[in-house]
Image (cartoon, helix red, strand yellow):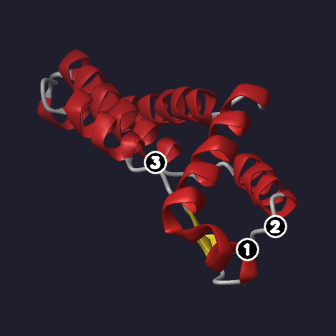
């Protein structure tokens, strides 16, 4: 369990960022200012939108826990320790479900940031 939380924090902190097309706006302001504009748009998106990231993690963890508990129960039946199988399977499933849920891109935020940057004169090629 001690390794699960740091792993989840690492996975969820690897946020994607927009990659800009080198149009006149980007050439005019330069990389440093464009990064500040990206940060500003992303902060605006976080503030304006109701972030679904936490909901996705919780939903994924809940679904993963249920699936993991069921798998653990089956394993527990074969080993003769049903309770232990439920607990272990639930914990593993919750961690896997939370990690998978946190990796799902938040398309609403991406769309918001893309529009914000377009309003500033940038053109987004995609996200890394």
Query: Callout 3 environment at 10 Å: few (<14), some (14 to 19), or many (20+)?
Result: some
Residue at 63% across, 79% down: 27
Query: x, y percentage for residue 26?
Result: 65, 74
The image quarter in which residue 69 lies: top left
- Determine whether label 1 and label 2 are within 8 Å by CB: yes
- Determine whether label 3 and label 1 are within 8 Å by CB: no
Query: Callout 2 environment at 10 Å: few (<14), some (14 to 19), or many (20+)?
Result: few
Query: Callout 1 environment at 10 Å: few (<14), some (14 to 19), or many (20+)?
Result: some
Query: x, y percentage for residue 89?
Result: 29, 32
Q: CA distance from mark 2 to mark 3?
A: 34 Å
The image quarter in which residue 9 lies: top left
Q: Is residue 116 visible?
A: yes
- State the residue position of label 2: 121
Q: CA distance from mark 1 to mark 2?
A: 6 Å
- State the residue position of label 1: 25
**Element type where label 1 sits in the image:** helix
Q: Is residue 7 left or right of residue 118?
A: left
Q: Nearer the viewer, residue 70 or 50?
A: 50
Query: x, y percentage for residue 117?
Result: 76, 59
Residue at 39% across, 31% down: 94
**Element type where label 3 sits in the image:** helix
Count of numbered badges drawn on the protein: 3
């Amino acid at each position: 369990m001690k390794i699960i939380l740091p792993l989840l924090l690492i996975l969820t902190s690897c946020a994607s960022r927009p990659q800009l097309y080198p149009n006149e706006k980007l050439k005019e302001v330069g990389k440093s200012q464009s990064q500040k504009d990206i940060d500003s748009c992303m902060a605006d998106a976080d503030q304006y939108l109701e972030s679904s990231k936490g909901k996705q993690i919780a939903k994924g963890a809940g679904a993963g826990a249920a699936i993991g508990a069921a798998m653990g129960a089956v394993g527990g039946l074969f080993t003769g320790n049903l309770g232990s199988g439920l607990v272990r399977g639930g914990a593993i499933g919750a961690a896997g479900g939370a990690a998978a849920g946190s990796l799902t891109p938040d398309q609403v935020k991406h769309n918001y940031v893309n529009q914000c940057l377009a309003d500033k004169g940038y053109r987004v090629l995609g996200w890394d």
